[in-house]
Image (cartoon, helix red, strand yellow):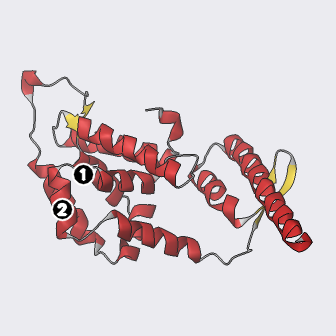
Amino acid sequence: MNMNQFTQKSLAAIQGAQDIALEHGNQQIEQPHLLLALVGDGEGFIPQLLTAVGMTVPSFEAAVRAEVDKLPKVSGSGREAGTVYVSQDVDRALQGAGQEAQAMKDEYISVEHILLGLLAHPNAALKELFRTYRLDKEKVMQALARESARQPAGEGLRLRTGSGWVYLTPIARRSALRVIAEGPDLELAAELCDFYAGRAAEVDRSISEHCVQEKDK
C-alpha cells in the first residue's frame, strides 16, 4: 500500500499502533493496537464519531485495551529490539480503508476510512467486540452523513492559495479542510486547495450546463 495516500492523522494512528505494540511487548501490530490508537486519541475525530454513533467511548476504549492486554508478549532473545511487524489482519484492514476512501471519492485515506476498514475486515477478537458494542459500518456511515449534513447547503469557503483567492463549494471543502487541519505542510495544503477549487469549478460548470439544458427543453 502506498503510504503517501494516508493523511498525517492516519499515519499518526499507524505509528501510534506501533508504539502501543512496543509498549506491550508485542511482536506484531495487530488490529486491537490500531483500533486503540484511533479510539485513544482524545482530541481526534474517531472518539467524536463514536460519540455521534451513541457509544460510551471510555467503556469501549477500556474494552479495546483489554484486547491488547490479551495479545502474546515476546521478550528476551526471541525479540528484535525496537522492531515490530504488521500482521496480515492489519494489512487487510488498511487495504479495506483504501477501498472505503475510493468508494467515498476521497483522495486520501483518513482515520474514518481506517475505522471502516477495521469494521469491514475484523479479526475474531474485533468481530466479537464490535458485536458486543453493536458497532457496524452502517451506523458509522450514518454518523458521517449526519456530520456532513450539519454544514448548510450552499455555504462555501474562501481561501487564499498560490494562485489567489478561491471559493470552495461544500463538495470541495471537506477534503481541503482536512488537509489544512492536519498540516503542517502548508505548501501542500495550498496546492490541494487549488486542486479542489478546480474540481469545485468543474462541478459548478456541470451544474450550470445542466440548468441551461433543462431550460432549453
The crowd level at tag 1 (other Cα within 10 Å; few <14, some 14-19, many 20+) is many
Q: Where is residue 185 in the image (x, y as percent from the top left)?
A: 64, 42
Q: Which of marks 1 and 2 is nearer the N terminus?
A: 1
Q: Do the residues labelled 1 and 2 touch (CB within 8 Å)?
A: yes
Q: How many marks?
A: 2
The residue indicated by pointer 2 is 129
The quadrant where residue 129 appears: bottom left
* Quarter the C terminus occupies: bottom right
Residue 40 visible: no
Q: Dot 2: what SS?
A: helix
Name the residue: 12% across, 51% down.
69
Residue 177 placement: quadrant:
bottom right
Given the current orientation, which residue lies at the most extreme front position? 217
Q: Which residue is drawn at 18% across and 33% down?
A: 27
Q: Residue furthest right?
A: 216
Q: Where is residue 158 in the image (x, y as percent from the top left)?
A: 79, 63
Q: Where is residue 124 in the image (x, y as percent from the top left)?
A: 15, 51
State the residue in front, 42 or 202.
202
In the visual, does 111 lie left or right of 89?
right
The answer to whether residue 199 shows anywhere in this view is yes
Q: Marks 1 and 2, Cα distance to the nearest angstrom?
A: 10 Å
Counting other residues with Cα less than 10 Å from the Cα at mark 2, is it few (<14), some (14-19), or many (20 or more)? some
Q: Is 84 on the left or on the right of 10, as rendered?
A: left
Determine which residue is flagged by label 1. Answer: 122
Q: In which quarter of the image is the N terminus?
A: top left
Disc 1 secondary structure class: loop
Residue at point 49%, 47% (across, down):
109
Q: Is residue 21 left or right of residue 76?
A: right
Q: In which quarter of the image is residue 155?
A: bottom right
